[in-house]
Amino acid sequence: MTSEDADKLLRAACEFQGRSLAARELCREEFRRTEAEQNNVLRILVDGQIGQIADRVTNKVQATNPAISYQIGVSASFIRTHFLVSDLILNGDLIEAIILIRKQLESLTRLHELDSEPFLKLSGKVPNIKIFQGAAARMYGGLSEVAHFSTSRVGELLHVAERGELVGPSLLPVFTERSLACFDMVHFVAVYFIAWIVEKLPAWYPGYDNYKDKTLLAETFILATDAGVLRLPEDGSA
């Protein structure tokens, strides 16, 4: 490859990345114009609580064991991924976001498994999503469809672009209202993660008072229910 060829390749990559960045900024602007105030407040509540939790779990846990260390690692990964997913959705990268939402639900599953199963029994095994019922289990099926691109309809998440007689998936992100539905899934999983870890903090940090955390979580749960993100099932299943 000549230096001229290398320059052409670099220029092509930079030009496409530049168009992509501009398209993502447009997605973010359109999302902000479209997002309902109630959903915006919920997003701030969820992000803020996870941010506070991140500050708290940076402290060293004195009494630990393999299961607790495992849970702390999974929790740290969940927190990091939460904000990555939010950025992907705001940028219009929905397939990539949904793949990570699936990972989040699997992480939440593993955290609960570690509360009830021996550490060695779980090590090396895929989280069993069947421990959840109702909406969580149904959502996982849809997330897996996207993660595996198992049907052609997944391509619709890329946005279908029309140019004259040509119709096909857009290579640049375009805002659609599917972004709002993606955030519903993010918040669904995140609220259950917050509920789990708020109960864990006093166990990991003896003397820690989680009263304020639980009060704020209750407010978040009510708002999420009002927004239709969470539903109270008649049979009590999640």
Image (cartoon, rainbow, N blue to C red):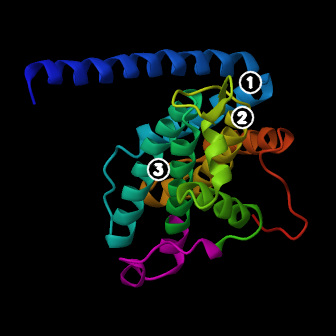
Give the number of the disc on residue 180.
Answer: 2
| Mark 2 residue element | helix
**How many angstroms separate mark 3 from mark 2 (CA)?**
21 Å
* Picture coordinates of residue 213, whole percent (x, y): 61, 43
* Residue 119 inside the magenta-drawn segment: yes
Left or right of 174? Residue 17 is left
Q: Is residue 168 above or below residue 74?
A: above
Labels 2 and 1 touching (C-beta < 8 A): yes
Q: Amino acid at mark 1?
A: Glu
Give the magenta range: 111-130
Q: Is residue 62 above or below residue 80?
A: below
Closest to the camera, between mark 3 and mark 2, is 2
Q: Residue at x 34, y 55 (%)?
A: 61
Q: Is residue 114 above or below residue 89?
A: below
**How many angstroms separate mark 3 from mark 1 (CA)?**
24 Å
| Mark 1 residue element | loop
Residue wearing tag 3: 78
Residue wearing tag 1: 35
* Picture coordinates of residue 168, whole percent (x, y): 61, 36
Q: Residue at x 31, y 24 (%)?
A: 13
Left or right of 18? Residue 158 is right
* Picture coordinates of residue 103, whole percent (x, y): 50, 56
